[in-house]
Image (tube, rainbow, N blue to C red):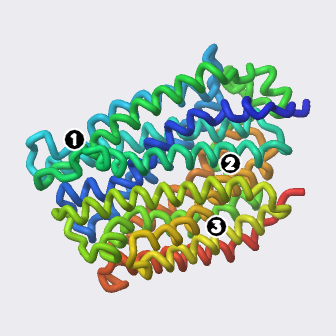
């Protein structure tokens, strides 16, 4: 097997640049879905059920994209065709979803239309997101992999900053942040329009700048026979066989992922109401104060991403990636604890900076540990698609139990931030179980 060459910085950058646009779409979804459905009339106890769709689509789509792209060899590349198709669908859906309340439908039909659009958006975002992780696994050597995923984390968080700030910025320049009951404000609608435009431009850039290896080159650098998969091979990518043969690090990192992603699912679901209750003393989605809290939550998400960008630059400086992972998650847990305790909107900046440290580690550390452990196993795309289950399954479970947990903590959305803190601390403790491949 030939050693993969060191790539110049801009080659590593180009491999992940399209992630900037994809993450804008993802940020708009994660920051505004609860706000959109609450504005449309959803009950807080039912809110977590809307969050089942994103991870459900991820666990269905990403392994399929991973397995199919392992066997796809075209003149346009191996992973890039899936990236481009996913982005194109996401653009169309982003123009439809925020208009769910403007179509003159009854409430039940509005909810059904919104759910359909959310399902399609999740499907397309997952289809566009997965190829970037696989491109790094395919083309970057072990020495540069942490750097490559840190660049991806930087672009991911930079895209998040843009997506999170759009509604706040548009309100500041005079676009209406209020609307009739059941209608999504123009600040949110235009945020989705602009995000869609940036997404397709970024993906076009990546497709023009990245040249994937052909089957022969791939086989030489990765030491596998899967380059022949398009023409039939005995090296079957049966998912159950792959999971059975997966290295221990695959499962141990997955355990950490379980607690981390459950924690963040509860933040995404309840943090708008938590911030609105803590700072503005209201959770009434019909009030202007609630919509203002929604915009400010977007700013706090952007601050979280700024913290993540800064922390992502420090992660490669840790000599032991497990220490980086553990410390990051503990800082994030402290951030969750502080959210219900900061009654001033500017004080909320502190907990979200700390949460950004955990987010940076969650984007960079797991894939570094797992792709290193998978070196020589083959079927990198299929394995990373299956590993996405460690992101999706905990969110599905957490979303299913969200209403029950909310009732157990006294029906207070602010208390869900304490639940997230406990989950993140447990995740940090589980990092000690991971054994690093020498």
For this view, does 113 lie left or right of residue 409?
A: left
Q: Which mark is residue 298?
A: none
Q: Residues within 10 Å of mark 2 (few under 14, many from 20)?
A: few
Residue 290 position by quadrant: bottom left
**Tag 2–tag 3 contact (CB < 8 Å):** no
Considering every residue shown, the one lying at the far front of the view is 173
The quarter of the picture where the N terminus appears is: top right
Q: Secondary structure at mark 1?
A: helix
What percent of the width, then of the height, locates residue 71?
64, 27
Q: Residues within 10 Å of mark 1 (few under 14, many from 20)?
A: some
Name the residue carrying label 1.
99
What percent of the width, then of the height, locates residue 206?
60, 26
Residue 270 position by quadrant: bottom left
Q: Cα distance, mark 2 to mark 3?
A: 23 Å
For this view, does 432 lie left or right of residue 202?
A: right
Q: Secondary structure at mark 3?
A: helix
Query: 79 or 360: which is nearer to us?
Result: 360
Q: Earlier in the sequence, mark 2 or mark 1?
A: 1
Name the residue carrying label 3.
256
Q: Residue at x 64, y 41 (%)?
A: 133
Considering every residue shown, the one lying at the far top of the view is 75
The quarter of the picture where the C terminus appears is: bottom right
Q: Secondary structure at mark 2?
A: helix
For this view, does 245 lie left or right of residue 406?
A: right
Residue 116, visible in the rendered structure? no
Name the residue carrying label 2.
241
What percent of the width, then of the height, locates residue 44?
26, 69
Q: Earlier in the sequence, mark 2 or mark 3?
A: 2
What percent of the width, then of the height, locates residue 72?
62, 24
């Amino acid at each position: 097997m030939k050693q993969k060459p060191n790539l110049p910085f801009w080659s590593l950058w180009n491999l992940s640049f399209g992630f900037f646009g994809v993450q804008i779409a993802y940020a708009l979804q994660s920051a505004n879905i609860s706000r959109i459905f609450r504005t449309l009339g959803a009950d807080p106890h039912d809110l977590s059920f809307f969050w089942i769709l994103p991870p459900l689509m991820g666990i269905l789509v990403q392994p399929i994209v991973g397995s199919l792209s392992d066997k796809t060899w075209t003149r346009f590349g191996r992973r890039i065709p899936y990236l481009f198709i996913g982005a194109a669908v996401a653009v169309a859906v982003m123009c439809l979803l925020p208009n769910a309340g403007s179509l003159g439908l009854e409430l039940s039909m509005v909810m059904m239309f919104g759910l359909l659009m959310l399902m399609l958006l999740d499907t397309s975002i997952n289809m566009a997101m997965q190829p970037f992780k696989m491109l790094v696994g395919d083309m970057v050597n072990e020495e540069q992999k942490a750097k490559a995923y840190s660049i991806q984390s930087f672009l991911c968080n930079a895209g998040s900053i843009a997506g999170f700030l759009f509604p706040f910025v548009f309100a500041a320049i005079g676009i209406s942040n209020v609307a009739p009951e059941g209608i999504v404000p123009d600040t949110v609608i235009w945020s989705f329009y602009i995000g869609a435009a940036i997404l397709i431009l970024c993906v076009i850039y990546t497709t023009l700048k990245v040249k994937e290896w052909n089957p022969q080159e791939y086989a030489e650098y990765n030491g596998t026979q899967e380059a022949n998969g398009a023409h039939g091979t005995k090296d079957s990518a049966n998912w159950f066989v792959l999971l059975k043969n997966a290295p221990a690090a695959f499962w141990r990192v997955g355990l950490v992922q379980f607690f981390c992603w459950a924690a963040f699912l509860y933040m995404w679901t309840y943090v708008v109401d938590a911030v609105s209750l803590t700072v503005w003393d209201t959770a009434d989605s019909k009030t202007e104060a609630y919509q203002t809290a929604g915009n400010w939550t977007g700013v706090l998400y952007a601050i979280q991403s700024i913290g993540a960008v800064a922390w992502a630059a420090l992660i490669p400086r840790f000599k032991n990636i497990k220490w980086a992972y553990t410390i990051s998650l503990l800082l994030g847990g402290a951030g969750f604890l502080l959210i219900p305790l900061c009654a001033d909107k500017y004080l909320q900046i502190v907990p979200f900076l700390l949460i950004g440290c955990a987010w940076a580690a969650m984007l960079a550390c797991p894939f570094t540990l797992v792709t290193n452990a998978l070196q020589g196993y083959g079927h990198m795309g299929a394995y990373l698609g299956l590993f996405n289950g460690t992101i999706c399954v905990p969110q599905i479970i957490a979303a299913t139990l969200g209403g029950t947990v909310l009732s157990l903590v006294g029906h207070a959305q602010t208390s869900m931030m304490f639940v997230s803190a406990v989950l993140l601390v447990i995740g940090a403790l589980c990092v000690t179980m991971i054994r690093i491949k020498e």
